[in-house]
Amino acid sequence: WEEKSGVDTNAVSLEMLEWFWINEMEPYDPAARFFRLIKQTANDCIFRDDFLPYIKELLSDHPGLEFLSNHAEFQEKYAVTVIARIFYSVNKCHSGRITLRQIRRSDLLEAFQQVDDEEDINKVTRYFSYEHFYVLYCRFWELDHDRDYRITREDLLKYGDHSLSHMIVDRIFDAAPRPFGKPEGSKDFLGYEDFIFFMLSEEDKSNEVSVRYWFSCVDVDGDGKLNNMEMRSFYAVQLHRMQCMGHEIVPFEDMLCQMMDMIKPTNPDFLVEEDFLKPECCQVSGALFDALFNLNKYLMFEQRDPFVERQKREDEFETDWDRFACMDYNRLAMEEEAREEEAMEIDWVNVDDEEDSEDFNSAAGLGGVSEAPF
């Protein structure tokens, strides 16, 4: 029909644009306009794929992402990462559907405005930072040895230099919130989006989403109360690990007394989520979770330097995640630089040995692996 009539059916006329503005945009405030733009017309909420056209345009037009233009695979993973981070922070009930009320309560509209104005994509730490994507995806890639985009329990045990106990890893697979539900058989693996939820929660235990994530994991009986018996069972694994690694043993009673003094629960017999979320507790409540299942971080907490802690409070980072992502990105960048230097040395050796056999030269040429678009 388009060829016969000469009319471009993909074109938007001024009349159509005016109708859309008058009926769909003008009567509403900015948050409602944003919501109505993103969602499908027939729906009353935003689903995961509704963001894809907008992230695609961002990848196409943003100067900070121009270097990804010829790398479709990494563009796709960047888009998945941004959308998963949005759902992590905005859709706090993990229903996989974002409502207008959730938009109003979030900073999502401000983040979209910032990424539209800011040329340096890494300054937009909320959702869009390329460096944050790099850290998340590289960590996933490091654990996914068979490249099936699935993390098994054995894979996750290696996270953070084997810092997590096997007990919490089992609970992550069995009980932790998933961003878009649990597909059949998913108790045996974590997909990339599931891993994003895990890692954001693990590296920043001071926010509401993270507290609720970990509380659901340690609340084994699901009664909404974390009692001494549950905490003791998790901590027993930590005690065994301390003993095996030759660390000084911290008895359960001593640890619990210290944590209760910091958190000051409403009821001394058990903890509830709200105890962790009190403003005066948000920066220290994560220490209890570390004591229960992350030995490396718990030992760091026990040996913390007050001067370093004060520096953290005064640094430029808004969240623990921002601080971790910056440090880990720098680590990964240094490792990549070292690999490039090693590859250059191999190239020089190849030039010096150019009289060797053709087969040898071909094999040596494999050292010049094509550079990842990171």
Image (cartoon, rainbow, N blue to C red):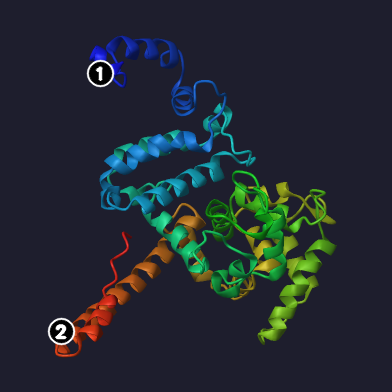
Question: Would you place residue 209 above or below residue 137 in this image?
Answer: above
Q: Residues within 10 Å of mark 2 (few under 14, many from 20)?
A: few
Q: Position of residue 312 (x, y in %)?
A: 48, 62
Circle nearer the N terminus (2, 1): 1
| Residue at (47% x, 58% y) in the render | 136
Disc tally is 2
| Residue at (39% x, 70% y) in the render | 331
Q: Position of residue 112 (x, y in %)?
A: 39, 36
Instruction: Tell me the quadrant of the picture where the N terminus can be found.
Output: top left
Q: Position of residue 126 (x, y in %)?
A: 44, 46
Name the side, left or right, on which 169 lies relative to 335: right
Q: Residues within 10 Å of mark 1 (few under 14, many from 20)?
A: few
Q: Which mark is residue 351?
A: 2
Instruction: Say what secondary structure mark 1 lies in.
Output: helix
| Residue at (31% x, 9% y) in the render | 15
The alpha-carbon separation of the residues under discs 2 and 1 comes to 59 Å
Residue type, numbered disc 2? Val
Name the side, left or right, on which 187 lies relative to 324: right
In this orientation, which residue lies closer to the viewer: 197 or 72?
Answer: 72
Residue picked out by circle 1? 3
Q: Position of residue 255 (x, y in %)?
A: 74, 70
The reply to whether residue 341 is visible in this rendering is: no
Instruction: Say what secondary structure mark 2 lies in.
Output: helix
In this orientation, which residue lies closer to the viewer: 339 or 204?
Answer: 339
Name the side, left or right, on which 283 lies relative to 311: right
Instruction: Tell me the quadrant of the picture where the C terminus can be found.
Output: bottom left
Question: Would you place residue 9 above or below residue 311 in this image?
Answer: above
Residue type, numbered disc 1? Glu
